[in-house]
Image: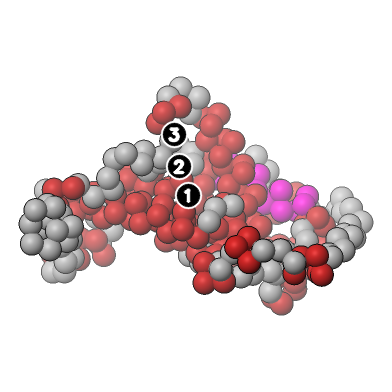
């Protein structure tokens, strides 16, 4: 696999000018109110920022310094994200190299309707999903689905329906301080953390990777994965709950 720096910027295509659709605003305003989502439920989509535009212009002009700056900023986090989809770091590095090639080849078609970061991760996720499927063709289809029937936290940790404060914690999460905190900060539990995230159902794994590893906002994750805010919130909660439970069991061992 070639280094992203070796791909060069020589074979540039001309800029692609997009034709914006004409919107009938009067007709749109006549829609029933119940068809419109409530503003409290939907976060605004964020488009390309001023700094994004600087980078986009540099890439389109063939400025390799701008490309190197982009690689330096995102390469490590892209590797970490790709590793959630594929079985080894070596394969993750190949996926990221393919992602950088995709950026060079597709920058003229980028319309700026999302941030550059979101577009970059969209390319990565598309390629990582495809590569991960090829690497795991023997995985049963049922193992790739989100198991909504299994609670993310064992039910016995909550008070029963006939108890005082039914549904509240009976065994609340433990505080991670003292020795437990030291073990976490020392990186001792990193293997458990990585293995647990890798074993999550795909939806939970993607959301927790983007939110807690790549540091995306909820709105960016919804835009990137094409899911609702409510769905994103549920997947994140379930994923985080399972990760915390695995860490609790490890630290108590």
Q: Which residue is mark 1?
A: 206
Percent x, y of residue 75: 57, 57
Count of labels shown?
3
Quarter of the image that includes the N terminus: top right
The residue labelled by disc 3 is: 144
Q: Is residue 161 visible?
A: yes
Quadrant of residue 134 within the rendered picture: top right
Q: Position of residue 18 (x, y in %)?
A: 87, 59
Read off the residue under disc 2.
Answer: 202
Residue in the picture at 75% in, 69% down: 29
Could you classify mark 1 by the number of other residues whose Cα lies within 10 Å: few (under 14), some (14-19), or many (20 or more)?
Answer: many
Residue at 29% across / 40% down in the picture? 150
Which residue of the protein is positioned furthest toward the top in this rendering?
138
- Do the residues under discs 3 and 1 have CB atoms within 8 angstroms? no
Residue 133, percent from left and from top:
53, 32
Magenta stretch encompasses residue 164: no
């Amino acid at each position: 696999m070639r280094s992203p720096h070796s791909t060069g910027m020589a074979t540039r295509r001309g800029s692609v000018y997009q034709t914006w659709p004409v919107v009938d605003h009067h007709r749109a305003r006549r829609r029933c109110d119940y068809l419109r989502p409530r503003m409290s439920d939907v976060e605004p989509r964020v488009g390309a920022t001023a700094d994004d535009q600087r980078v986009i212009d540099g890439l389109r002009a063939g400025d390799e310094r701008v490309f190197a700056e982009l690689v330096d900023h995102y390469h490590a986090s892209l590797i970490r994200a790709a590793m959630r989809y594929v079985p080894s770091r070596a394969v993750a590095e190949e996926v990221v190299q393919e992602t950088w090639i995709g950026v060079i080849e597709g920058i003229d078609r980028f319309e700026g309707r999302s941030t550059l970061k979101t577009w970059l991760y969209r390319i990565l996720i598309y390629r990582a999903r495809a590569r991960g499927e090829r690497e795991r063709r023997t995985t049963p289809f049922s193992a790739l689905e989100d198991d909504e029937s299994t609670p993310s936290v064992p039910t016995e940790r909550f008070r029963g329906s006939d108890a005082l404060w039914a549904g509240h914690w009976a065994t609340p999460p433990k505080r991670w301080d003292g020795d437990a905190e030291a073990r976490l900060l020392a990186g001792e539990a990193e293997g458990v953390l990585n293995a647990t995230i890798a074993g999550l159902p795909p939806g939970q794994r993607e959301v927790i990777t983007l939110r807690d590893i790549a540091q995306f906002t909820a709105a960016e994750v919804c835009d990137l994965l094409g899911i609702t805010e409510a769905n994103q919130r549920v997947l994140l909660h379930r994923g985080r709950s399972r990760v915390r439970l695995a860490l609790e069991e490890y630290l108590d061992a």
